Amino acid sequence: MTRRFDAIIVGAGQAAPPLAARLTRAGQTVALIERKLVGGTCVNAGCTPTKTLVASAQVAQAVRRAAEFGIDAAAPRIDMARVRARAMGVAADSRTAVEDWLAAMMGLTLIRGQARFTAPDRIAVGGEDLSAPRIFLNVGARPSRPDLPGAGDVRWLTSTTILDLDRVPEHLVVVCGSYIGLEFAQMYRRFGADVTVVERASALIPREDPEISEAIRGILAAEGVMVRTGADCIALAPGPRGVRVHVSCADGAPEVEGSDVLLAVGRTPNTDDLGLDAAGLATDARGYLPVNDRLETAVPGVWALGDCNGRGGFTHTAWNDFEIVAANLLDGADRKVSDRVPGYALYIDPPLGRAGMTEAQARAAGRRIRVASRPMTRVGRAVEKGETQGLMKVVVDADTGRILGAAILGPGGDEAIHGVLDMMTAKATYDVLARAVPIHPTVSELIPTLMGELSPA
């Protein structure tokens, strides 16, 4: 017998609970299927536990720097088991809050198990058949399994399994110098590990402009993180201390010996076991489900939200996916993915906040641009806090005056960037922001000043 619903949501990640809430408030019956943990990656293995760990690492670093501020303090002693327990506790509390929210929704049925399509409007789960005219896929992604020589010969960590560590590695080797890898690199260095980052490209986070990338490298190097870029032949092998990572760089030793290795080499969408063929669906070469500007797949009545659609890959973009779908279905709106301004953060300390295009991207798009930048050494708030590494930068369209992008690498950069992000969303020109009267002393107060220093580039 088939159980019929008005809507089926597969995956209880970031987009699912608010979408279920909107649909059930509209009087619809909804089945929400989750095979593992409610809350998805963010709550269980992403933002919530990792940023809790980052907070512990910041405290440890603050204690080490206490003498710079005229305060005598003993060197920190890291109890990694307690650090981990705190992070897992915060994640568990967040997951419980989501579960309580779902339990209170009238018209929602939460079903545990693996979902598979049997037809475009039918899902099988736990020996039961479900059907609905609307199906929303919110199945998320997982750490990629790397195709590296020797990966089958050693034990390696992912961004998920490293959360199980209740010890500080003697020497952590991080393969891939991008956002996830760098957060763990600095974090574990502050917990007391020796850390080496191995990156195939010639620079860390190569999608960022060169001065941003170099500043990030400088921040990590100042704390003792070793960085090996241009690693043209990465391979793994057992070593006397645990693992040997072959680097083959032009400079430095050809190999790095470590006790542990973290492979932070990207994420893979969880689309390979959904029985997509039965629904007439197909993924692209990387496993993502192609969607249009309204997040509709090629099959009418099926949407893809969050990490599995390849249109964002962040918690905040998954939430915005929900907003787009709900507004279009329930409010008669015509919202589009292409309307949102891309933004993200790198949670090293100090953090990087990014909105819109880099300078390189703007040039590649053929724009005539004006650019301004200011080092954090010329930002009073950063000087007062003793956090003068980094810079802020803005890129403006020389013809329209519209802000194309900005980066703030410095204290509170992940928060200060929202002033620019909001103005970009409002499609305001740079001179509107230049006339703002910000609060002193803040990092944000220099953004209008930055707008007044634009020059052709």
Image (tube, rainbow, N blue to C red):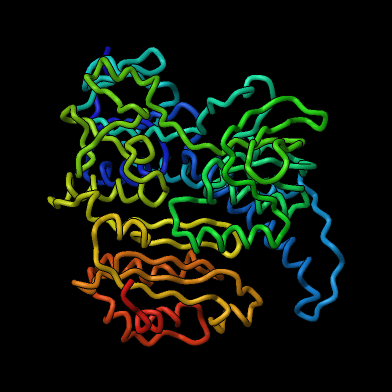
Indicate the position of residue 253 as horizontal and vertical percent values. 73, 41
Asked if residue 88 shows in the view, the reply is: no
- Say which quadrant the N terminus sits in: top left
Front residue of 119 and 287? 287
Indicate the position of residue 211 as horizontal and vertical percent values. 50, 64
Front residue of 106 and 214? 214
Is residue 36 placed above or below 373 in the rendered structure? above
x 52%, y 44%: residue? 201
Give the total number of marks visible in the rendering.
0
Indicate the position of residue 436 as horizontal and vertical percent values. 34, 85
x 42%, y 21%: residue? 114
Is residue 136 placed above or below 433 in the rendered structure? above
Q: Is residue 257 left or right of residue 51?
A: right
Q: Is residue 87 left or right of residue 415?
A: right
Q: Farthest residue toward the front? A: 250
The image quadrant of residue 16 is: top left
Asked if residue 401 shows in the view, the reply is: yes
x 55%, y 57%: residue? 347
Front residue of 13 and 275? 275
- Say which quadrant the C terminus sits in: bottom left
Is residue 327 placed above or below 394 in the rendered structure? above
The image quadrant of residue 134 is: top left
Indicate the position of residue 411 as horizontal and vertical percent values. 56, 70
x 22%, y 45%: residue? 26
Is residue 247 placed above or below 442 in the rendered structure? above
